[in-house]
């Protein structure tokens, strides 16, 4: 019996429970559930294994893998999983947290708004896409502005739940900025809601995390007003 068959046997999956967890989008912890041996295989070894398994899925669906258009698909999917859409699973791909001294003593709120979010629901492996708005008060440390975009992107590029993504970004910002005062607002559309199940294309999901000074209502409101403002830039 193959090794993969044993992996499934040990899970004792209850199908009803699996459907309920998927539709309610419940998650279990702030940390992404990874095994201790998650990075024993190299990226190249993972691509080869996933390629084989994805070919099995396509074959099981009845597709003809000798077809010119289909035959490269298992490799393309495997490479996309490992090198692109789930690239943020591996801590070695985490953006470098280079800090600078806050030389100009800027003390007010910094807002980075309309950051693209491209992530993937861990219950269905379908995308959810939207925008993140981030704010912080810097203490003695500042980081490059593009670093904020990179942090959002890193934590998005893994099988995710939007609530967990929001918390992981907030935690990383606190560490990177050495500040308690961070705010994260994410709004996104989930393809597992729009293309299957309830098939609702209009609804979107908002998640927020307010820490430190952002627990104060006025500060929160200032942040919201800033990201709602449309500044004309020509
Ligand atoms: Zn989903």
Image (cartoon, rainbow, N blue to C red):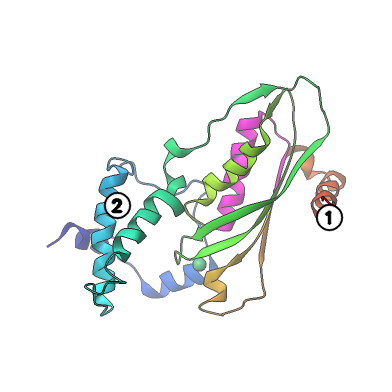
Furthest-right residue in this view: 218
Instruction: From the top left corner, tell me how far across and down residue 109 is, in percent.
Output: 81, 37
Which one is in front, 28 or 140? Answer: 140
Compared with 176, 229 (above or below) is: below
User: Residue 21 versus residue 140: which sits nearer the camera?
Assistant: 140
x and y, in percent, of residue 173 in the image? 63, 37
Question: Which residue is pictured at 66% across the width and 32% down the height?
Answer: 144
Instruction: State whether label 1 is within 8 Å of ligand 1.
Output: no
Mark 1 is surrounded, within 10 Å at the Cα level, by few (under 14), some (14 to 19) or many (20 or more) other residues, namely few
Q: Which disc is residue 47 wearing?
A: 2
Label 2 environment density (alpha carbons within 10 Å; few <14, some 14–19, many ≥20):
many
Under tag 2, what secondary structure?
helix
The residue closer to the viewer here, 198 or 58, is 58
Q: Residue at x 31, y 72 (%)?
A: 69
Up-down: is 188 above or below 225? below
Please report contact status of discs 2 and 1: CB closer than 8 Å, yes or no. no
Mark 2 or 1, nearer chain start = 2
Can residue 63 be seen here? The reply is: yes
Q: CA distance from mark 2 to mark 1?
A: 43 Å
Q: Which residues are magenta?
A: 161-184
Tag of residue 137: none
Residue 147 belongs to the span the image colors magenta: no
Determine the secondary structure under disc 1. loop
Image coordinates for residue 227, horizontal then vertical, percent? 79, 51
Residue ID for mark 1: 230
Q: How many marks?
A: 2
Place of residue 72 in the rendered image (x, y in percent of width and height, measured from the top left): 29, 64
């Amino acid at each position: 019996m193959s090794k993969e068959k044993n992996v499934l046997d040990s899970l004792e999956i209850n199908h009803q429970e699996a459907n309920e967890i998927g539709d309610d989008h419940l998650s279990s912890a702030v940390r992404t559930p990874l095994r201790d041996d998650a990075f024993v295989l190299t990226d190249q070894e993972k691509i080869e294994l996933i390629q084989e398994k994805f070919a099995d899925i396509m074959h099981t669906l009845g597709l003809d893998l000798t077809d010119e258009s289909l035959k490269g698909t298992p490799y393309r999917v495997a490479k996309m999983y490992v090198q692109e859409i789930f690239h943020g699973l591996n801590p070695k791909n985490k953006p470098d947290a280079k800090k600078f001294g806050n030389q100009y003593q800027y003390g007010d709120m910094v807002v980075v708004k309309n950051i693209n979010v491209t992530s993937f629901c861990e219950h269905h492996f379908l995308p959810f896409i939207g925008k993140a708005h981030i704010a912080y008060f810097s203490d003695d440390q500042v980081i490059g502005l593009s670093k904020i975009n990179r942090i959002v992107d890193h934590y998005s590029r893994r099988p995710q739940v939007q609530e967990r993504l929001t918390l992981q970004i907030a935690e990383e910002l606190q560490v990177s900025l050495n500040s308690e005062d961070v705010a994260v607002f994410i709004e996104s559309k989930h393809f597992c809601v729009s293309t299957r199940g309830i098939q609702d294309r209009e609804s979107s999901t908002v998640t927020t995390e307010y820490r430190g000074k952002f627990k104060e209502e006025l500060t929160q409101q200032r942040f919201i007003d800033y990201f709602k403002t449309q500044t004309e830039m020509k």
